[in-house]
Image: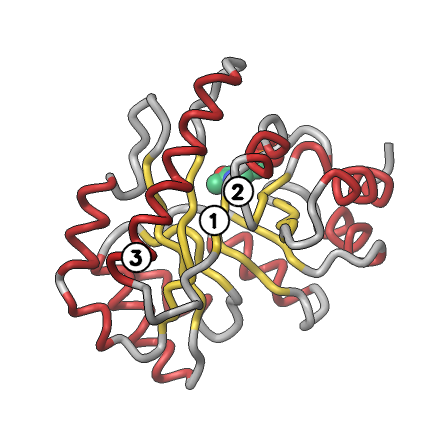
Amino acid sequence: MSVAKNLDRIKSQLLENVTLVAVSKFHPKEALEEAYNAGQRIFGESRVQELDGKAKDLPSDIQWHLIGHLQTNKVKFIVPYIDTIQSIDSWKILFEINKYAEQAGRKIKCLLEIKIAQEDSKFGLSFDDCRALLRDQNWKALQYVRICGLMGMASLTDNEVQIRKEFKSLKSFSDELKSSFFSDNPEFCEISMGMSHDYKIAVEEGATIVRVGTSIFGEREY
Ligand SMILES: *Cc1c(COP(=O)(O)O)cnc(C)c1O
């Protein structure tokens, strides 16, 4: 199957208001070009160095999403061009992004990464960490980051019941935060959940963004 056909097939399964992020990590830039030529403009990468290289070589109208953990010392490299950082997991990183975004004169869309999986993941905020981050009002002073919603990854399992439960928990947490902290901010509206093996469930459970790699580009070679 070609990249273009895969994109067509996946898009036909998404609701119109769901954004498809093509996760291109570990794939060569020729694969991204194929997707670009088929009309895809939103790409997700998980490592800053790889993202930087691709962003330099590929068309400037691509909207790049960072979906992997971001270290504070790497923020300055991506701030000049990144569209959305989906992997915000601390106050410190949000603060650092704001600082460089101010220098660059850009406002950067950010999603808070929430731990919803059973397995112990290294990154992401627990529900309580996230509530604490938002309760402490400091983030409101950050003029150059726009908190646009949440990102989460379900457990790596074939158990559909479990996956659905985790997606439901992210949706209801999003509803909670909307009413507690963002009732006057319609920008907080995105729920990024669902990957190749579970994006159909994610869409049923209210995803507004899905992040699909393997089903578009094939298996990654590490
Ligand atoms: C790699 C990755 C994806 C895409 O995974 P596939 O199974 O290849 O679709 C989605 N989200 C995150 C955070 C990832 O790291």
Between 196 and 29, which is closer to the camera in this rendering?
196
Q: Which mark is residue 44?
A: none
Q: Are marks 2 and 1 in contact (CB under 8 Å)?
A: yes
Between 118 and 75, which is closer to the camera in this rendering?
118
Indicate the secondary structure of the residue bearing disc 1: strand
- For the residues labelled 1 and 3, the Cα–Cα distance comes to 15 Å
- For the residues labelled 2 and 1, the Cα–Cα distance comes to 7 Å
Question: Residue 194's x, y, as percent?
Answer: 55, 36
Label 1: few (<14), some (14–19) or many (≥20) C-alpha neighbours in 10 Å: many
Q: Quadrant of the C terminus?
A: top right
Mark whose residue sits in front, 2 or 1: 2
Q: Which mark is residue 179?
A: 3
- For the residues labelled 3 and 2, the Cα–Cα distance comes to 17 Å
Name the residue that disc number 1 marks.
191
Earlier along the polypeptide chain: callout 1 or callout 3? Answer: 3
Q: Which mark is residue 206?
A: 2
